[in-house]
Image (spheres, rainbow, N blue to C red):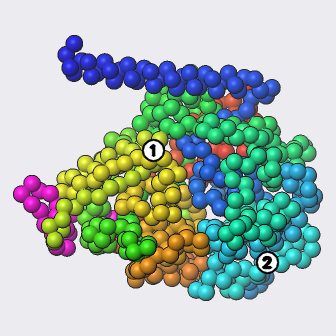
Amino acid sequence: MHPKQRRWFNLFLAGIFTFLGAISLAACSESWLHTRSEPPLVFSVITEPKTFNYVLSNEASNIFSYTYEGLTTEDGLTGETIPALAESWEISSDGLQITFTLREDLQWSDGEPLTVDDVVFTYNQLYFNEAIPTAIRDIMRIGESGALPVVEKIDDRRVTFTIPEPFAPFLRNTGLAILPAHALQESVETTDAQGNPRFLSKWGSDTNPADIICNGPYTVASYAPGQRVIFQRNPYYWRKDDAGNPQPYIQELVWQVVESTDNALIQFRSGGLDIIGVTPDYFSLMKREEERGEFTIYNGGPASGTTYLTFNLNQGSRNGTPLVDPVKSRWFNQVAFRQAVAYAIDRDRMVKNIFRGLGEPQNSPISVQSPFHLTPEEGLPVYDHNPEKAKELLLSAGFQYNALDQLLDADGNRVRFTMITNSGNETRRAMGEQIVTDLRQIGIQVDFLTQAFNTVVSKLSNSLDWEACVLGFTGGIEPNSGANVWLPNGRSHHFNKAPQPGDEPIEGRVVSEWEEEIGRLYIQAARILDEDQRKAIYAQTQTITQENLPFIYLVNPLSLSAVRDRIQPIKFSALSGALWNLHELRIEEDAA
């Protein structure tokens, strides 16, 4: 057999075995599911839950939208703030006091009453507790002083929040989960051998699900690590339909851990999953199968999140060791270098080849659905593909090329760095591979690695041992929800991370003037209630971001999901996906 034929044959066999293995996995899953008395709703995630502790979670992929609610929530279609655990609220004429009234007879999943005491406990002893490291605190800080609201009980159903100055995002931010004082109070008030609140080890992913108390539509019934999380309907959930029937209607959810988008596709096509995000590389295939497969592909328009390339700009050290090689740190911290990289990346080619035309270049950290989004037509700086411009910027910044067209810095060091992204996401992997190719055209060598999602998050959040990364953030209507990304000391300010409580100290960290300015503008915008004035301020933040490029934004894809036709009524949106109205969904076996 010719070597090329042999290689093709080996790849063919490998593909067959991968396919059969995934089919076998899906078949086992279906066999297991068919032992249930009622059909559950089955969907997948790439990574298993890192924690069942809402306060300590930093991952977008988590269980909490199914298990907890806050005082308010967001309409999945309009983004409007609407009541949840609170049935109503009143805002004082000066905008500094907001009083919420809870619904009557609220209960926790163990049958205990849910009262204002739980609200006060959640905010004062969890979110506002400096001994508990949580990114949530950043979005609740108000003004330049970073003051937190004063939360006080009026009676068992009424609670008041007093703020030091007007804070436009406040009402939307009260969608934060309310947690049970009777289950968690002791863990906050007692400490471990290191003097930390025992709460920091409470409700980890190794916790018995029966011990996790919830207030949302579902509770955690079981968790098999590396396999699945099973949710069961919370019998004490507050929602009822117009006829007085308890909601949600679907008794059980199954969250399958499928660590590859390719395997998730195979499981969906074989009937093992009910919902799947549709990536561009298999959109055409699935579109042809809609009728036969008895599913519908929903298109919510541009996705609300961001995908980006970012460099580690932290110039600090830990225990005398620089977080980033000082030679590379000098490259990364030159604006001209980051701009050159932005010009070198052919995002139009990404849209055409990787996203199959189902998207467009992305330029802003603020979601296109937000009224505060700034467009290029309104003056937002953009970096259209221009490798010659990239080379000019590099040469003007003191870089040089050798006889092999390899980029060197002024000291003769070859420009080479390592870029990481999370494994299992084939689209991000393909984007990373194109970035490697594009940057090679301007003489830069990129060593590209895929790693487990939790490993990537740990590097960005804890060890800070990374050079460049392709990742993404979720988005939304309110820009201040991203304050923990843009405040220089925010927990998600990954490109120049400040040490958080409990972290090892960082010596010599430098915060640039433009970082400080973005943080100042976010604080200013939050205290202004007039939407036009806020838009003007957020326009400045987006302009500064694009001029300095802490994140090089890549592609904004269409938000696409395939859902079995037997699941109704689906009200799909890019803001909230297919399950935001989960409480009213039914599985109609005769829908076909």
Q: Secondary structure at mark 2?
A: strand
Residue 225, by quadrant, is: top right
Closer to the camera in the image, 322 or 106:
322
Where is mark 2, residue-wise?
A: 151
User: Quadrant of the image for the C terminus?
Assistant: top right
Residue located 53% across and 51% down the image: 454
Q: CA distance from mark 1 to mark 2?
A: 42 Å
Q: Residues within 10 Å of mark 2 (few under 14, many from 20)?
A: many
Residue located 30% across and 61% down the image: 342
Amino acid under disc 1: Ser
Image coordinates for residue 400, horizontal then vertical, percent: 13, 66
Q: Nearer the viewer, mark 1 or mark 2?
A: 1
**Mark seen at residue 280:** none
Query: Which residue is at the far left?
Result: 403
Question: Against 140, is 25 above or below?
Answer: above
Looking at the image, residue 86 sits to the left or right of residue 104; the answer is left
**Mark seen at residue 423:** 1
Residue located 48% across and 26% down the image: 288
Whether the magenta-drawn stretch holds residue 417 is answered as no
Question: Against 95, is 22 above or below?
Answer: above
Q: Secondary structure at mark 1?
A: loop
State which region is magenta: 380-408
Image coordinates for residue 513, horizontal then vertical, percent: 40, 83
Amino acid under disc 2: Val
Q: Earlier in the sequence, mark 1 or mark 2?
A: 2
Image coordinates for residue 366, horizontal then vertical, percent: 50, 64
